[in-house]
């Protein structure tokens, strides 16, 4: 009886074949989708790297450096090696330092001197300059001036000066450290363009004979208002136009423009009536104003030192014939 019962009852721990089959199918299903998912992730990974590599390559090719990291890899910094791109390795196209506005070449300044500054100077001009040298002589200067002298006649005018018959001979025979020019009042009736053109030619010829001299172009001085009203060719507007034309000849390096009207102005751009007897020329006791202006507007540099040491600055010393 007991033996029969044991044969009819299954063992308590036996597993049904159906359950085993289901577990097997589930395991296969899990393995299949797990492997598929893994393969899919591996297949996606090269695509992302390729995109990163392409972006990096594009970025580096723009800079010409295939080894440079992308912006996402490092903070912006100065490259440790020069780029192979000609644009980045070529010098920056800038104006040479010697010619920039901030350099000493253009940054000259006027200084105040005394009469010894004029010891190697030559003054060229008409009757106005003649009056300056007669009544308020700038130091021991030399001068070539006479009434009615113009820019058109300055080089050919016969005027015995220090043993020379004309200005051209004087400039060829003596060397000066400074040359002062004031011409133009007698040319007020001439065409401004022709006047400026001839003025330029004269300055260039002076430079040819005096290669180391400072050249000072002085403005044409105004006349009184009443003098202008009598003769419109001497109008301030005409004088200003001519002054502006000759001002362009200055290079602020070795040719300078001096606005002498700054010290001879009644406030309306005319010569003060009390300074003159005829409306155009200064009275003797007012030439000092012009003289003082020149003393306060002098250029001193390495090539034109002051005070002048005559024992060393032989080239700047005037050599009398």
Image (cartoon, rainbow, N blue to C red):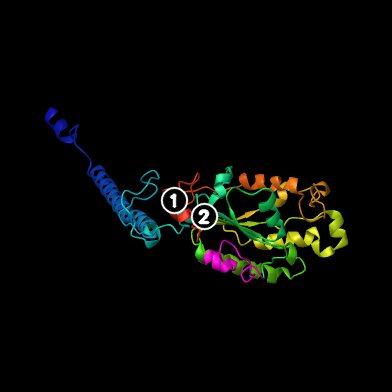
Q: Residues within 10 Å of mark 1 (few under 14, many from 20)?
A: few
Q: Residue 135 at x, y = what percent? A: 69, 49
Q: Residue 182 at x, y = what percent? A: 66, 59
Q: Residue 308 at x, y = what percent? A: 48, 46
Nearest the viewer among 57 and 176 is 176
Nearest the viewer among 131 and 303 is 131
Residue 300 appears left or right of 249: left
Residue shown at the point (81%, 50%) measured from the top left: 268
Residue shown at the point (70%, 60%) measured from the top left: 243
Taking the magenta stretch, the answer to whether it contains residue 168 is yes
The residue segment tinted magenta is: 153-172
Taking the magenta stretch, the answer to whether it contains residue 130 is no
Nearest the viewer among 148 and 218 is 148
Disc 1 from disc 2: Cα separation = 10 Å
Residue 35, compared with residue 183, is above or below; it is: above
Q: Residue 98 at x, y = what percent? A: 46, 54
Magenta: main secondary structure = loop
The image quadrant of residue 190 is bottom right
């Amino acid at each position: 009886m007991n033996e029969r019962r044991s044969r009819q009852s299954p063992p308590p721990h036996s597993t049904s074949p159906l359950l085993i089959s289901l577990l097997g199918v589930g395991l296969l299903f899990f393995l299949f989708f797990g492997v598929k998912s893994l393969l899919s992730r591996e297949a996606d990974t090269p695509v992302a790297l390729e995109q990163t590599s392409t972006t990096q390559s594009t970025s580096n090719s723009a800079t010409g450096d295939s080894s440079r990291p992308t912006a996402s890899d490092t903070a912006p910094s100065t490259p440790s090696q020069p780029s192979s791109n000609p644009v980045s390795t070529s010098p920056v196209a800038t104006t040479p330092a010697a010619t920039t506005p901030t350099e000493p070449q253009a940054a000259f300044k006027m200084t105040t001197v005394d009469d010894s500054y004029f010891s190697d100077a030559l003054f060229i001009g008409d009757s106005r300059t003649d009056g300056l040298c007669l009544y308020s002589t700038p130091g021991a200067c030399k001068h070539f001036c006479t009434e009615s002298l113009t820019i058109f006649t300055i080089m050919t005018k016969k005027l015995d000066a220090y043993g020379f018959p004309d200005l051209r001979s004087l400039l060829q025979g003596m060397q000066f450290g400074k040359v002062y020019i004031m011409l133009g009042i007698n040319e007020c009736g001439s065409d401004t363009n022709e006047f400026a053109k001839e003025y330029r030619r004269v300055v260039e010829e002076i430079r040819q004979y005096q290669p180391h001299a400072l050249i000072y172009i002085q403005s044409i001085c105004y006349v009184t208002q009443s003098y202008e009203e009598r003769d419109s060719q001497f109008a301030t507007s005409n004088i200003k136009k001519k002054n502006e034309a000759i001002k362009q000849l200055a290079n602020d390096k070795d040719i300078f423009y001096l606005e002498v009207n700054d010290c001879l102005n009644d406030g309306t751009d005319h010569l003060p009536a009390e300074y003159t007897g005829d409306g155009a020329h200064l009275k003797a006791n007012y030439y000092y104003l012009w003289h003082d202006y020149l003393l306060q507007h002098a250029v001193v540099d390495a090539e034109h030192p002051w005070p002048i040491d005559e024992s060393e600055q032989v080239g700047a010393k005037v050599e009398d014939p």
